[in-house]
Amino acid sequence: MQSNAQLIVKLVVYFLLCIIAFIYLLPFLWMFGTSLKADTELLDFPPKFFPSKPHFDNYAKAINRFPFWKYFLNTVIITAGNLVGVIVSAPLVAYGFSKVNWKGRDAMFFIMLSTVMIPGAVTMVPTFMIFKNLGWLDTFLPLIVPAFLGGGAMNVFLIKQFFSTIPNDMIEAARIDGANDWTIFRKIMLPLSKPVLALISLFTFIGSWNNYMGPLIYITSEEKYPLALGMPMFMNRYGTYWNQAMAAATLTFLPTLIFFLFAQKYLIEGIKLSGMKS
Amino acid sequence: MQKKNLKSLILGLLFISPWLIGFIVFTVYPIVASFYYSFTDFSITTKPKFIGFGNFSRMFSDELFWKSLINTLVYVIGLVPLGLFIALGIALLLNKKYLRGIPFFRAAIYLPSIVPAFAFSAVVTLFFHPYLGFVNTILSWFGINGPLWLSSEVWAKPTIIIAAQWGVGGAMLIFSAALKDIPKELYEAALIDGATKLTMFRKITLPLITPTIFYYLVTSTIGNMQIFDLPMLLTGGGPANASLSLGIYIYKHAFTYTNMGYASALAWVLFGFILVLTLLYFAFSKKWVFYLGNE
C-alpha cells in the first residue's frame, strides 16, 4: 500500500528525470532538425524543431563543401593506430608492474601514476621540438607513436588491477611446468584479460577520436585533416549555412552515436569501475 | 639469490621498457627542457637565449596573462561546483529503487559527454545563436530579449560553463557507482531508529560518498585548470579575450606567436597553480573525507 505522498514523490522523480533526459538530448534534436531545413526555413520566426518537409540534400551539399570522407578516413587511421599501440604496449607494462618482482617496482609505479598530474602544456613545446627534429610535423606519427610507449598511465593502472585478480598460483604452476614469463604473459595473462582490454579499447577509441589539440598542433595541410580540424574549418567557412553546417555536425556525430549504441553497456560499467579504483 | 634478483630486475625493466622509453623521451626530457626554455627567449627558428627571469617578470605587466588567469579561475570556480551538484543530483535521482527505465535515462544523459567537442561546439554555437538559436527563441516567448551569449563579453564564459554541463555524464556514473556501494543495512538500521530521509542523507549517504566527491574535486579541478577545447572551438578566446583561458593563451604563444620560451614559462606557472590547488585539497581532506572502516 502506498500513501499519496509517496506516489507524488515518485511522479516528481519521473517528471524531473524526463525533463533532464530531454535537456541532455535537446541540442542533438535541434542539430538534426536544423540539418533537414530548407534554406528559406532557417530564418523562420519562431523557428520550428523539424521542418515541414525534410531536406536530405543538405547532407549531399555539406559533403560537397568539404571532403568529409577523407577527413573521416584520416580520423580512422589515427584512431586505429592508437588502438594498436595501446593494446600492444599497455599489457606488457602492466605485467612488468604486477607479476614480476623487482627492486624499485612499486616506487616506479608510483612515479608513473604521478605523471598524470603534469599538465600537457608543460611538455608541449619540447615534445613539439622532438617531433620537429624527427621531421614528423604534418604527419600522423606524433599522434600515433606515443600510444605505443606504454599506452597511458591510466590504462596500465586498469590492466594491472585486473592482473592482480589472476591468482599467482596459476603463474607459479606454469613456471614449474617450465614456462618463461613471455609465455605466461602471452598464453595465460592476455587471453584472460579480454574484458579489461575491451574496456581500454573503448576509452582509447573515444580519446583518440575526440582529440582536438593534438591535430591542431601537428597537422597543417588540409588533406591530412582529421574530422577534429575539418569540422571547425567547415564552421568557419560555411557556418552561415546553418542547415548544411548541422548536416556536417550530424555526420561527425554519427560514428560516436553508433559506437555508443554498441558499446554503452561495457562503457558505463567500465567508467564506474575506473572511478572506483582510483 | 643475488643473481636471481638481478635477473628479475632486468626482466621487469624489459616488460616496462615501452613505458620507460616513453617516460624518458616524452616526460622527463620535456620537463627538463621546458624548465630550461622558461628562462630563455626562444622561437622555433632561433636557438634558445638565456634571459634569466625575464619571462616571469614579463608576466607581471602582461595584461592578457592576468586576464587569462582570472578567466581560468572563473571557469574552475564555475565548472567544478556546478558539475558536482548536477552530476550528484542526477545520480541521486537515478538511485531510486523503484525506478523503471534507468538504462534509458542514464544513456541519454551520458551520451553527450562522449560527443567530440569539435562536433558539439557547432551545435552549441547554433543552440545559443542570438537570433536563430533555441535558447533565445524560448526566452522570447516569455518576452525576454536574450543576450548575445558567446558573442557577448559578459556572457561568453557563462555560456561555456553552461555548455560544459552537457558533459557531466562520466562524473554522474562514478557517483552512481558510489551510491550503489553504500551498505543497505545502514539505511535499514537508521529506519528502525526513526531517522528521516534528510537525516539519512546527511548522516549516511553524504559521509560515505565523500571519497568520491574528493576524487571528483581533484580530477575536475586539474582538468578544468587546463580547459582548452570548448573555449577554443566556441570563441577562440574571444570576444575581446573575454573567454581566453590560460590553456589557450599558452597554445597561442607557443604556436601562433612562436614565443616558445614565454609559453613554457606560462605552462610552469599553470603547473604551479595546479600543484598548489591539489595540495590544498589534500591538506583539507582529513577534515571532511570519511573512509568507512578507518574509525
Image (cartoon, coloured by chain):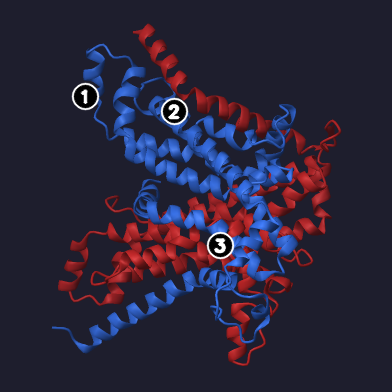
Chain of the residue where label 1 is placed in the rendered structure: A
Whether residue A140 sits left or right of residue B279 in the image: it is: right
Task: Report the front residue among A145 and A168.
Answer: A145
Q: Please state the chain letter of the residue tagged with numbered disc 3 in the rendered image.
A: A
Q: Which residue is mark 2?
A: A93
Residue B33 location, x and y as percent?
A: 71, 32
Q: Residues within 10 Å of mark 1 (few under 14, many from 20)?
A: few
> Mark 3 or mark 1, which has the lower sequence index?
1
Q: Secondary structure at mark 2?
A: helix
Q: Circle 3: is it few (<14), some (14-19), or many (20+) Cα within 10 Å?
A: many
Q: Amino acid at mark 3?
A: Thr
In the image, which lettered chain appears blue? A
**Residue labelled with disc 3:** A250
Tell me if I can see residue B271 in this picture. Answer: no
Question: Which chain's residue wears label 2?
Answer: A
At which x and y percent is residue B105? 37, 68
Residue type, numbered disc 1: Asp
Q: Does label 3 or label 2 sit earlier along the sequence?
A: 2
Which residue is outermost to the bottom? B143
Q: Is mark 3 in CB contact (under 8 Å) with mark 1? A: no
Residue B106: quadrant of the picture = bottom left
Q: Which residue is mark 1?
A: A169
Q: CA distance from mark 1 to mark 2?
A: 21 Å
Labels 3 & 2 near each other (Cβ < 8 A) = no
Q: Could you tell me which residue is drawn at 54 percent across and 69 percent down?
A: A32
Residue placed at 60% from the left, 86% from the top? B139
For residue A89, the mark is none
- Res. B187 in view: yes
Of circles 3 and 1, which is in front?
Answer: 3
Q: Residues within 10 Å of mark 2 (few under 14, many from 20)?
A: many
Colour applied to chain B: red
